Amino acid sequence: MADVTSPILELQRQRMLLQLEYEQEKEAFLQAQQARGVERLVARGDAWMPLRVGRSYYNSLNQLCVEVFRQPTAEDEEPDDHNFEFGKPVQFFKVDGANGSNGQSPSAPSPHQPPSPHFFSSTGTVSYVDGDRMVVAVPDGFPVADLLLADDAQLGVQLFFDETSYRLMFEALERTMRAKGRLGYLRDLFYSRQKAETYSFPDMGFDYLNPTQEHAVNEVLRAKDVAIVHGPPGTGKTTTLVEAIYETLRREPQVLVCAQSNMAVDWISEKLVDRGLNVLRIGNPSRVDDKMLSFTYERRFEAHPDYPQLWAIRKAIRELRSQKKRSDNWHQKMDRLKSRATELEIRIQQELFGQAHVIASTLVGSANRLLDGQKFGTLFIDEAAQALEAACWIAIRRAGRVVFAGDHCQLPPTVKCYEAMKGGLGRTLMERIAHEKPEAVTLLRMQYRMHEDIMRFSSDWFYHNLMVAAPQVQHRSILDLDLPMTWVDTSEYTDKSANPDDPDDEDGSESTGTSNSRLNRLEARLTLLSLQAYFELIGRERIQQERLDVGIISPYRAQVQLLRQLLRKNECLKPFRRQITVNTVDGFQGQERDIIVISLVRSNDEGQIGFLRDLRRMNVAITRARMKVIILGDSHTLTRHPFYRKLWQYIQSLKTASHA
């Protein structure tokens, strides 16, 4: 069969689209920094202020680190989620307007304009973040003393534009275009309809896997080049992938496991550790607890018997560097110490890598210098449907074959440039291979999460009606004769008589101005009222006794923030606040709740639904629920789109069937 396209031309197109995304994201970052101001960045989770500075120290990787703590403000008793995570670049700032050596002082603010931030010249990198505590790795020579002297109320830290990830992706595309050998072979295979090669052997049986999970593990083991495990919501993709990795390690000494996000790497790593495998995590986890830290490279490095000796040598090197008066043999002494430190570092590193079954990192993290020269028989990419193609090529260069796991009917990669999205940057390598090589794909069909009626709509629309509910969840519900899915039509509440005394009541969705996000104040209040009404039906005692948990989801960040504010003030829901989580669709990826409430926000006469056209996000939102989905949306606006019209009709048919 002829090639679908020239691999080199396709990679050049990917590079061009990635360049568009890079330029737009950088421009948007710079504009946002100027326009939004510190308060808005804090509200969006892109900055922490006020900030308390803790200790500074050198970590086991010999990086200078500064510990900082987010301080609550008077009105912010429960700080919102933030966007800081390991590996992201950050920049410290002050808003006191004082002159200093770190940058230029801003001009005095006008009475109507908040003071401009005064940035420290050097950027740092997030090393750890857990709750309101963060550790930032900074360059040697960073003015830590200036941070300590600053007034806490005037000190902050914000995310900086991430040049490193883009640089690594561009380098990966260039390397893949030039590649010979195995990488060149995989490149040519992935961009053609040529069949991937497989081994031939009888199926192995696994007592605790269902037939499609068992088949997926066998297909992974047979694959010489590539295999795809397609895991719809609740089908046990992680369980299947862990078993595939375990079985692969009976044939290979070590594998590389990657994912797009730190959270996804943590999740699969934890499950592999539970399976009894020795995991070495390159980079630091997004959830910092003893179990997660115990398999990080940094913690293992510190625990090595030779580390105290290495630490003493590094301390001696720093002291020697700080000497103002240098003796004749200063250089000889420095060279001796450096040589001994390097020797110890290499020995510790070789031992740690030699003991590990699994090396785990993000796709970008697989470029870490610790992995220089390392080759693996198999690379497993989890949540591959959320990874840009260029990011996958960073890790693929280290492997002989690739196993993708994920679901391209759920969350796609984040692409902010419309032209790049239109050009196909959002189409992942997993999706491309699944389309061109369907024989390499195994669909997991039995789901263990949700009531059959919740599953059915998703199965019909996204998975060709192939999904089956496991018997133990088929009819799971909270109340007898309860409808698993309901739609509260907010178009019935849009006149002012719904709340005539509230001057803030709004008829529809509104833009938040400097952000592309939207909110709908009336719908936010109706969302909490709908949850209250359902709680009354269940009974308060039962909710607390059974610890029923709730997810309130909106595709729009501004609506999420409004819902969080209203929830804090809501006295009726106060006793259950710990059981209720409010977040965006992206924030709920990989999670599940007993009850899911979805606020769709959009309401207008033109039927404009914007961001809601990305139907994969709705698939994620609906399928987070185990037993109940409550959707709030303006049916007049939404049902002009065929997906929402079908969803509306499906929910009405459930209501009709229940009355029959």
Image (spheres, helix red, strand yellow):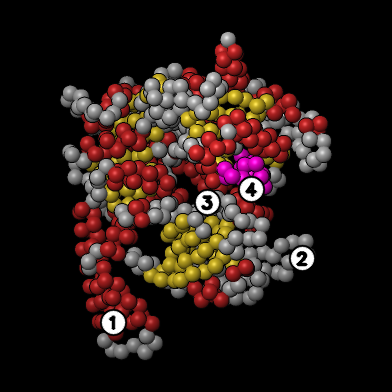
Query: Where's residue 138, x and y in %?
Result: 45, 66
Picture quadrant of residue 249? top left
Q: Are marks 1 and 3 in contact (CB under 8 Å)?
A: no
Q: Which residue is mark 1?
A: 331
Q: Which residue is mark 3?
A: 83
Residue type at tag 1? His
- From which residue to which does the magenta span run? 555-577
Q: Position of residue 378 (x, y in %)?
A: 26, 40
Q: Amino acid at mark 2?
A: Ser
Q: Nearer the viewer, mark 3 or mark 2?
A: 3
Q: CA distance from mark 4 to mark 2?
A: 34 Å
Q: CA distance from mark 1 to mark 3?
A: 44 Å
Mark 1, secondary structure of its residue: helix
148 sits to left or right of 231: right
Q: What residue appears at the point 54 percent right and 72 percent down from the top-left corner?
A: 147
Which of disc 1 and disc 2 is earlier in sequence?
A: 2
Q: Nearer the viewer, mark 4 or mark 2?
A: 4
- Foreground residue, 652 or 223? 652
Of mark 4 and mark 2, the one earlier in the sequence is: 2
What is the three-letter code of the residue carrying label 4? Arg
Q: Which residue is mark 4?
A: 568
Q: Disc 2 marks which residue?
A: 110
Q: Amino acid at mark 3?
A: Asn
| Viewer-side residue, 359 vs 295 | 295
Label 2: few (<14), some (14–19) or many (≥20) C-alpha neighbours in 10 Å: few
